[in-house]
Image (cartoon, rainbow, N blue to C red):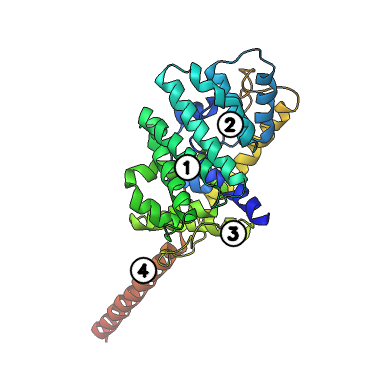
Amino acid sequence: MRLACLWLALIPGIASACLNDRDTLEHEARNRPAVTDAISGWFDRNPPLYYQMRIDRLEKEASLTTAEVDDLSVAYDRIGESAKAKAVIGPDLARRKSSDERYRWYANHGTFLAHGWFKAGAKPENLADLRQSVFAIEKAIKINPQAHFGREGTQLAVLRYFLAMKEGKTKESLGEWLNRSLHSSEWERGVPGLIMLGNAWESPDMFAAYAYLLQKNEKPSHAEFAIFRYEELVKAGKVPVTIDPKRGLAEVKTSTGHPVLTEAATKRHEARTKYMLDRLQIGEHPDTDPRFWSGYKSPKRPPPDSKIPWQTIQVGALLLAGLGLAFTFVLGFGLRQFRGKTI
C-alpha cells in the first residue's frame, strides 16, 4: 500500500503534461519552456479549490462543448480523480469532428489512463491501461505532431520507459532511456513542459533524468541545478521509484543551486496562491470574472546567477592573490633599484 501511494504521489506528474484545457493554452501563449524556470519553480501552479470550483460550475450545465468537456475532465484529473476524468471524456470522441478536437481527446484520454494505472499501484501484472495510454498518446501525436512544441514526444518516451521497466525489458535509468530515445531538440522543450504543466515538479526521478540529459549535452551548471532540486525533493521525503535514477551522474557536482532565484520563485508561488485563495473563497473565479487578476502583479524574475557561484569566487580570489604577489614583487624590485641609485 505504501509503495502504491508513492507511485501515486510521484509518478503521475511525470506523465501529465499532455493535459489539454484552457489553462494549457493560456500558459503556452505566455511562456516558452526555460531550464532555470522549470528547476526553480518560476511558473504558475493553481490550488485544488481552483479546479473544484470549475467542476462545480460545469457540472451544473445542461450540455457542454468539447472544450468544456476537456476543462471538466482535466479539472477532475488535477484533483486526483482520474477515473472520473476518464468517465467524463470517454463517450465524447464520437461527436468530435475536427482534428484538433480529436487530438485533445486522445491526448487527455491517454493521460487519464496512465494516471489511473499509477493510482492503482503501477502493478506489472496489470499493464492494460498503460498500453492503452501509450496507444492513445501515439494517436494524438499522429494527429498533431507539433502540439505543445512537441512535448507529447517526451511524454510518450517516459510512458514507454515505464512499460519497458515493468516488463523487465530495460535496466536503464530514465535519463539514459530519454537520452537514447529523444533528440535534444525534443527533450529540451519536453522535459520543462512536463515539469511546468504537470506534477513532475514534485518528482525526483524527473529531475535526476533532466540532470543526466543536461550533463550529456554539455550544460554542467544546469545539470548541477537539476541535481540540487533532486536532492531537495529527496530530503523533503519524496522517494525515487525508477531504476537507479542517479546512474551516470557521478560527474555532476552537488551545488547550492541558484538560491536567489529559488527563494524568489517560492515567494512568488506563495503570494500568487494567497491572492487566488482570497478571491476563490468568496466565490470569484478566473473562468467567470474577467477582472479576477486585475489586482495581481507578478514580481520581476531575478537573473538565475544573482549569487556568484563559489567556484567563481575561488577563481577570482586566486587571480587577485596572484596579482597581489606580482605587484609586491614589482614594488619591491623598484624600491631596491631606487635605493641603489640614491646611495
> What amino acid is labelled 4 in the image?
Leu
Q: Is residue 84 left or right of residue 248?
A: right
Give the residue at x 56% y 26%. 89
Q: Which residue has dot 2 on it?
A: 86
Identify the mark nearer the N-term, 3 or 4.
3
Q: Residue furthest right?
A: 282
Say which element carries label 1: helix
> What amino acid is labelled 2 in the image?
Lys
Q: Are marks 4 and 2 in contact (CB under 8 Å)?
A: no
Nearer to me, 212 or 301 = 212
Q: Is residue 53 left or right of residue 334?
A: right
Give the residue at x 39% y 40%. 153
Q: Which mark is residue 319?
A: 4
Q: Which residue has dot 3 on it?
A: 234
Identify the mark nearer the N-term, 2 or 3.
2
> What amino acid is labelled 1 in the image?
Arg
Camera-side mark, 2 or 3 = 2
Identify the mark nearer the N-term, 1 or 4.
1
Identify the mark nearer the N-term, 1 or 3.
1
Q: Kindly report the distance in space between the C-alpha atoms of the residues bearing marks 2 and 3.
A: 31 Å
* 154 relative to 88, above or below: below
Q: Which residue has dot 1 on it?
A: 131
